[in-house]
Amino acid sequence: MNSNFYDKPSIRILTVEDDRDFSFLIQNTLNRESDMDVVGCAGSEASAMELAAELRPDLVLMDLNLSSSLSDGIHTARNIRLHSDAKLLILTAYESPDIVVSACKQTFASGYLFKSQFDLLVETVRKTVAGPTPQLHLIYSLILSDLSSAEQSVLHMLMGKNVTLHSSAKTISNQKSSILRKLGLHRQEDLIHLMKQYL
């Protein structure tokens, strides 16, 4: 291993997990690594949002099942992504492909890991923060799949890519609105903030 590896700043991690025993296991596992620092542990949506804003972690390790409703975890994860620069790694007991795909798209995640794959946690955290990973590219492709080819071109233009558009200004404006609607967003600034990690 490169002797300079551990001279790098520690990866600042916020965990969001309502199971205290599992949260403790995560914290102990990650804090054993000299290049990782669990700076906070949240067990609810309110505390997750507060700590993400206060601690400014590099990565949020997020359990989707914060309550009896899966939508609560997705809502929290999405809000963290909207209001911080942290990468989002979903750690979930749900192994249904449909649930995982939907959650990753809705939260604009950087990656995911099943709880049954816990032995891969340290490696996955490192790779997610270092990026880009195959999972990141996959999630980006899944998000793009909801857009038409014309909308994808407009999105790339908004992200600063050199794209030649042949549509009228009105059509492009309509396509921008369509992109926001399809991705459940209200502001172009939020779109750019969420998508910049993929490009």
Image (spheres, rainbow, N blue to C red):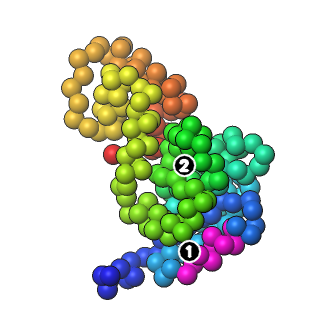
Residue that badge 2 annotates:
81
Question: Mark 1 touching mark 2, by CB under 8 A?
Answer: no
Q: Tell whether position 55 is magenta.
A: no
Secondary-structure class at tag 2: helix
Going from N to C along the chain, the mark reached first, 1 or 2, is 1
Give the side of residue 166 with respect to residue 174, left or right: left
Relative to 184, say whether 113 is above or below. Answer: below
* Residue plotted at (30% across, 32% down): 157
| Horizontal relation, residue 108 to residue 196: left or right | right
128 or 187: which is nearer to us? 128
Circle 1 residue: 30
Q: Is residue 11 left or right of residue 71?
A: left
Specify the segment rendered in magenta. 23-32
Q: In the picture shown, does residue 41 fall above or below 109?
A: below
Label 2 sits on what residue type?
Answer: Arg
Q: In the displayed orientation, state which residue is furthest to the bottom.
A: 3
- Percent position of residue 93, x then y: 65, 53
Rendering coords of residue 49 (x, y %): 66, 54
In the rendered image, is residue 17 in sight? yes
Whole-number angstrom distance, CA of label 1 to CA of label 2:
22 Å
**If the image is split into quadrants, where does the N terminus sit?**
bottom left
Q: What percent of the width, then of the height, locates residue 153?
A: 30, 28
Residue shown at 50%/48% (left/top)?
A: 109
- Give the structural element (helix, strand or loop) at label 1: helix
Residue farthest toward the right in the current orientation of the protein: 68
Q: How many marks?
A: 2
Q: Amino acid at mark 1?
A: Leu
**For the point 35% across and 55% down, which residue is it?**
132
Does 86 sit above or below residue 108? Answer: below
Residue 125's label in the rendered image is none
